Amino acid sequence: MAQPLLRAIDVHKRFGATEVLKGIDLEVQQGEVVAIIGASGSGKTTFLRCINLLEEFHQGEIQVDGERIGYTEGTHRRLGETAISAQRAKIGMVFQSYNLFPHMTAEQNVTLGLIKVQKRPKAEAVETARRWLDRVGLSERRGHYPYQLSGGQQQRVAIARAVAMEPKLVLFDEVTSALDPELVAEVLAVMQDLAKSGMTMLVVSHEMLFVREVATRVVFMEGGRIAEQGPPDALLVNPKSERLATFLGRFHGVFR
Amino acid sequence: MTYQFNFDVIFRSFDKMLAGLWLGLWLAALSLAIGTVIGLLAAYGRQSRLAPLRAVVWTYVEIIRNCPILLLIFFVYFGLPELGIFFLGKIESFVITLSIYAGAYLCEVFRAGLASMPARYVEAAKAIGLRPVQRQVHVVLPVMFRITLPALSNNLISLFKDTSLAAAIAIPELTFVTRQINANTFRVMESWLTASALYLVTCYAIAWLLRRVERRYAVIR
């Protein structure tokens, strides 16, 4: 097998005295769509945030495309901010509450990183932004400010902002959890489209139908550890562990 | 009432009053601009990891906020030359004083603005790979200015009214000019009523204008 795009080795993270990640080992291959599921407090979001260093971790190692993320070899000393910023630029992230820059239009939200981080000429950045906004179905809304957009539209802009930078890996952190139910589908449709195009995605989600349909692999986290993983059909329909069965029981009726 | 109003003499000097008003506006605008820079630096200083820097900024803010501004104006204009520090002139001296004064108040405004900055914007800026300075320039400061715009407006109006204190060191702004007209014509009521009306209309106009700007730039609704 080729070198994995993402490799996490024994990642530990503490908040004060509480250990929230108790040794995560995970490999994600290029083009995989890996869904992380689990109860709140199981460490899913924290693990995702460690990958682009929005959270520090205290032990272990994360590599993206062979490059060690955030810390020096051996001593586990944090890299400088400039080096970390450069690493983050290669990893896209979409947040639960969209986090669009409120003072910028949809198009400016997308072009900011292209111009300031990737140093692309403005005209090219604008063209790229328009292409992506078109792809997420928002070409009509590119001059709108976030407050003029619905939650679903804002989240689609946020996805365009992340993927326009052509990241190697895109992290999705419960991106539909803050949305009204009727707006969830439009966001999931965009994500499904991206998954089909071969983008490598790591998705924390409670949308089990989406997970089952789109993910190539499902990872079940429990108490800061990966408890079980496998193809969605096997894992979601025939969970091996009692705990996963209990967890899935809450999504009653979805699978059986 | 036996007082006979006669505005003729006032209107003969009206151009002088308008010139005084205009000068006052300039003094306020200039002081706000310089004060904004001081206030921003001070606000970042208050957040610094260096305890001595935080202490220096805290001392500056507390001294300025707890001394009457007229005293500061006299101190800078009359006091500093005694120490061998000569300014170019009264106007420069006054603008420096008012800027330092504004800086202390704006420091608190910006400090509150930075503290109320939602973390999610900074996280989004980090996630797309912006470096620390870029995050401040392109995200934190623009959002913070929009959050603090109402407070900035209040400060500008306040500063404009404070320019009347420049009369104390004979800068020919509106209050000083009015006092001269009053002295020359003995039309007490007419002089001060006219000046008051000019201040009122100007302040109200500034407030109205800034409210429009606020609405235009309100981003978090």
Image (cartoon, rainbow, N blue to C red):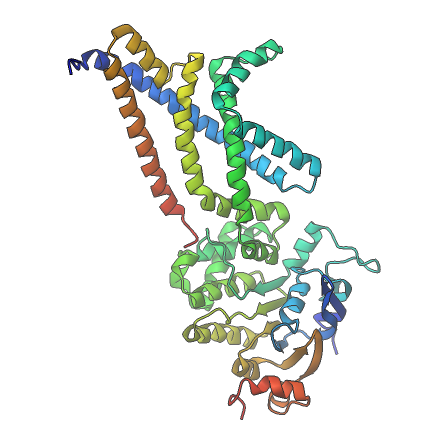
Q: Nearer the viewer, residue A168 or A15?
A: A15
Tell me what residue is drawn at x 43 percent, y 58 percent. A146
Q: Nearer the viewer, residue A143 or B217?
A: B217
Q: Nearer the viewer, residue A154 or B173?
A: B173
Tell me what residue is drawn at x 42 percent, y 68 percent. A137
Left or right placement of residue A27 versus residue A165 in this view? right
Q: Is residue B14 visible?
A: no
Q: Is residue B77 visible?
A: yes
Tell me what residue is drawn at x 59 percent, y 35 percent. B42
- Give coordinates of residue A80: x percent, y percent: 73, 50
Q: Nearer the viewer, residue B217 or B115?
A: B115
- Give coordinates of residue A41: x percent, y percent: 63, 72
Tell me what residue is drawn at x 51 percent, y 27 percent. B101
- Give coordinates of residue B158: x percent, y percent: 41, 30
Q: Is residue A250 above or below residue A12?
A: below
Q: Quadrant of the N terminus of chain A?
A: bottom right
- Give coordinates of residue B118: x percent, y percent: 53, 54
Q: Quadrant of residue B206?
A: top left
Q: What residue occupies the far top of the structure in this picture? A: B184
| Number of residue marks | 0
Q: What residue occupies the far right of the structure in this picture? A: A74
Q: Is residue B210 above or below residue A233?
A: above
Q: Is residue A233 above or below residue B138?
A: below
Q: Is residue B10 above or below residue A18?
A: above
